[in-house]
Image (spheres, rainbow, N blue to C red):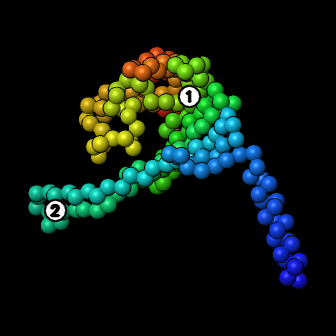
Amino acid sequence: DLRAVVAEMLADVQQRSSLLAGGTSGHDGSFFIASDDTSFRLNVGGMIQARYVADFRDDSDPDDFESGFQVWRTELRFSGNVHANWLYFIEGEFDRDGGAFNLNDAYIGYKLNDRWTLVGGQVKAPALREESLHERFQLAVDRSITNSVFSQGRSHAVAAIYTDDTFQFIPVFSDGARSEDTD
């Protein structure tokens, strides 16, 4: 019986290891699954932002101090490439009230060469630098009031991205400001 169990386990191990052939996975700044030649790649990532809030009020209410921790943002992100030149990006976050999953950005793109990339989908309109900077790279708790007033938000767009060593140029054709998740 013991030899039969060992033989069965070795056969199972052989089958599982053969399924891994022809690809790689790991972590190189993001968790990924890729083909050996990296022409196909799926990056999986996310972010959880928690913060402590203390609220001091000076009024007649005896409970003029409230404090506690908040989970401010919880995001999931999938990105990668297909056939080396085609790229994709999908990002969504869980709503603070109820936990519903909302789509933030979703686009596909084609890399023409080392400098030019064409993309299309739902993206942040590149109008303000503060809005274009992802939340995970911000130094402050949240964005400024100026950004809240003048931000273009997300829209459905087609863009051509030119990237040089010193600057980036992004002409965009979109369906207008703050038109995310609309027809």
- For the N terminus, the quadrant is bottom right
> Which residue is located at x 77 percent, y 59 percent?
16
Specify the amino acid type for callout 2: Asp
Image quadrant of residue 151? top left
Location of residue 167 with respect to 67 vertically, above or below = above
- Real-space CA distance between mark 1 and mark 2, rounded to the nearest whole angstrom: 46 Å
* Amino acid bearing label 1: Gly
Q: Position of residue 46 (x, y in %)?
A: 49, 48
The disc label shown at residue 64, or none: 2
Discs 1/2, front? 1
Q: Is residue 56 left or right of residue 76?
A: left
Q: Residues within 10 Å of mark 1 (few under 14, many from 20)?
A: some
Secondary structure under the numbered disc 2 in the rendered image: loop
Q: Quadrant of residue 183?
A: top right
Q: Furthest residue to the bottom?
A: 1
Vertical side of 25 occupied by 69: above or below:
below
Is disc 1 in contact with disc 2, using a CB cutoff of under 8 Å?
Answer: no
According to the picture, the residue beneath numbered tag 1 turns out to be: 121
- Which residue does the image show at 36% across and 55% down from the upper left? 50
The residue at the point 58 percent across, 43 percent down is 43
The dot on residue 138 is: none
